[in-house]
Image: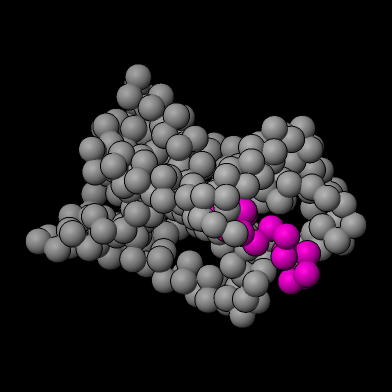
Amino acid sequence: MTLHSALKSGLEELNAGLVSHEQWLYMAVQDIRLRYRRSMIGPWWVTISTGVMVMMLGFLWSHIFSTDLQNYLPFFAVGFVLWGWMSGQVLDAAGGFFQFQGIIKQVKLPFPIFVLRLNVRQCIVLLHNSIIIALVLLFMGKEFSLVSLMAVPNLILIQLNLTLLSIVITIFCTRYQDMTQVVNVGTQIAFFFTPILWQEETLKDRTYLAEMNPVYHWIEMVRSPLLGRLPTMNDYIWSIASLILLLGLAAYYLGRYRSRIAYWL
């Protein structure tokens, strides 16, 4: 299969998955309902535990770094909630197709449906956890403005990046099952290399270490508007460039290997 035919076939598969939005939306909602069917408050338990962690770690690390709590806590809260959303999708993707191997082996469906199903589950959790961000910003006196609304389209842009990245990771980990552990460890390392616990200013003349991290720019695309400032041009360049790169990789992987996925499971 040539590169052109693989990309064309992969783009058709992506389009087929997006068009089938009724399926993956319904399945994602059902997954959440089944997961918390015996719980009184459902996914709000995740919100409560995340909120407690944000407050405790926010107070702790602001003292460790000797920074003003009023500036540090909103920075940390937004970054931590966004990281939970992003890492959740990556970790779900590492074992994505194995969860649905019974369906994949019996029914022919576009493979992006299964990835989108996992992504939507994390988006539902993010909607619940967004309450934490709103409360922290209000508690610390951060006002919402028109700039804050830019977080919505930027969030959609980052979600597109994450969906395409999830497709690449899912196919790769399906082919090489040992890579699931590599993804898990890599995600943990990325957390400490990304300005979430610490602020970029702490690097002083080595801020290029943060600037070379695409995850940092993805977070800043949403965090900056919520904190009342515009994302930088570098944030947009990295986010759009990664979208183009991941679109090419996801399309190629789908077009090249979709006929083999069922045999790998």
User: Which of the image's four quarters has the N terminus?
Assistant: bottom right
Image location (x, y in percent) of residue 49: 59, 54
Residue sitting at x 42%, y 59%: 57
**Residue stretch rendered in magenta on the structure:** 250-265
Q: Viewed as shown, does residue 135 lie left or right of 66?
A: right
Total number of numbered discs in the rendering: 0
Residue sitting at x 67%, y 69%: 174
Q: Could you say which quadrant of the image residue 91 lies in?
A: bottom right
User: Is residue 258 located in the magenta-colored stretch of the structure?
Assistant: yes
User: Is residue 57 located in the magenta-colored stretch of the structure?
Assistant: no
Considering depth in this image, is 51 or 237 the residue closer to the camera? Answer: 237
Image location (x, y in percent) of residue 151: 41, 32
User: Which of the image's four quarters has the C terminus?
Assistant: bottom right
Considering depth in this image, is 66 or 78 the residue closer to the camera? Answer: 78
Q: Residue furthest right?
A: 106
Image location (x, y in percent) of residue 240: 36, 41
Instruction: Residue 258: tell me if it is visible.
Output: yes
Q: Residue furthest front?
A: 2
Instruction: Residue 117: tell me if it is visible.
Output: no
Q: Is residue 175 above or below residue 156?
A: below
Q: How is the image coloured?
A: one colour
Residue sitting at x 73%, y 46%: 110
Considering depth in this image, is 265 or 224 the residue closer to the camera? Answer: 265
